[in-house]
Image (cartoon, helix red, strand yellow):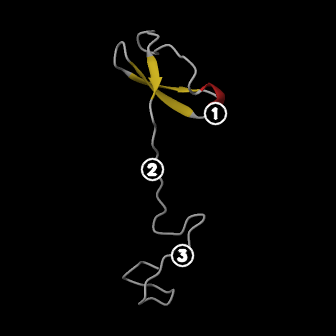
Amino acid sequence: MPIYEYVCKDCEKVFETIRPMAQSDAPIPCAVCGGKHTKRKLSVFFAESGGKAVSGMSEPSCDSCGGGNCSHCGH
């Protein structure tokens, strides 16, 4: 199950909870003050490939490399 972030409009605190996706926007009381005026935050995530290709992308390369050890693009 995913972790969702919510902000309480009563105490202005942010809290997280694990919920099913079907309940992501369902009302939830604040985990800090118990207030009922909460809203789900837009959460972002960070993904890093370390310079390597990730699914759906082609291998990185530049005009000066032949697929070996290139100092320009790291390929």
Q: Amino acid at mark 3?
A: Glu
Graded by Cα atoms within 10 Å as few (under 14), some (14 to 19) or many (20 or more), the crowding at tag 1 reads few
Name the residue carrying label 1.
Answer: 1
Q: Amino acid at mark 2?
A: Phe
Residue closer to the observer: 4 or 68: 4
* 48 shown above or below 71: above
Q: Quadrant of the N terminus?
A: top right
- At 42% across and 14% down in the image, what residue appears? 32
Residue closer to the observer: 14 or 24: 24
Residue 43: percent from the left, percent from the top? 46, 38
Name the residue carrying label 2.
Answer: 46
Residue 59 disc label: 3
Q: Amino acid at mark 1?
A: Met
- At 50% across and 13% down in the image, what residue appears? 29
N-terminal label among 1 and 3: 1
Q: Secondary structure at mark 1?
A: loop
